[in-house]
Amino acid sequence: MTTLSQPLIVASSTNGRMSPLENSDRLTRPEFERGYATTPNVKKAELTEGIVYRRNRTIDWFVLRGGRYEPLAAATDGLCRSEVLPGLWLDAAALLPGDLLTVFQMMQRGLGSLEHATFVRRLQEVAGQERS
């Protein structure tokens, strides 16, 4: 399977014009590979049985409110913060391109936050009461 990650210009097999590589385009393997060869940094698309499939990488975080899942927007600093598990922070902007060091650092920061420490303390209190 050949993979690509950004739109690139290839000749369409249906009309011969130059157009961006898009989902559902029908290309021959040589057309697709020609585009791949001219754009080596592209990694997130594939040609399966003559049809182009592009993966649009997004992170959607939801929260359950009133029996319905609603999108949870990132904070102004770009971090997604769980409303259920205080201290669970995700840097989606770092995760998408694979910057796992930054993702890990932000998760560690969240787990070191006062809100997470308070949450852990409450869990320990409840666990201690249940044992009594």
Image: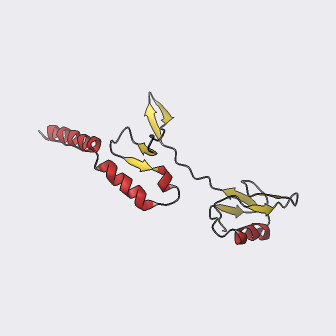
Compared across the picture, whether 41 is left or right of 110 comes to: right
Task: Look at 42% across and 49% down and name the residue there.
Answer: 90
Q: Is residue 1 above or below residue 117?
A: below
Compared across the picture, whether 15 is left or right of 91 comes to: right
How many callouts does the rendering have? 0
Considering every residue shown, the one lying at the far right of the view is 15
Q: Quadrant of residue 101?
A: bottom left
Type of colouring: secondary structure
Considering every residue shown, the one lying at the far left of the view is 132
Frontmost residue, 67 versus 59: 59
Q: Quadrant of residue 12?
A: bottom right
Frontmost residue, 22 versus 24: 22
- Residue 44 in the image: x percent, y percent? 62, 61
Task: Look at 38% across and 52% down and name the residue there.
Answer: 106
Task: Look at 29% across and 46% down and name the residue there.
Answer: 113
Task: Look at 26% across and 43% down and name the residue there.
Answer: 114
- Residue 24 in the image: x percent, y percent? 74, 54
- Residue 4 in the image: x percent, y percent? 65, 63
Frontmost residue, 128 versus 37: 37
Quarter the N terminus occupies: bottom right
Quarter the C terminus occupies: top left
- Residue 127 in the image: x percent, y percent? 19, 41
Considering every residue shown, the one lying at the far front of the view is 77
Considering every residue shown, the one lying at the far top of the view is 66
Compared across the picture, whether 20 is left or right of 94 comes to: right
Compared across the picture, whether 102 is left or right of 27 comes to: left
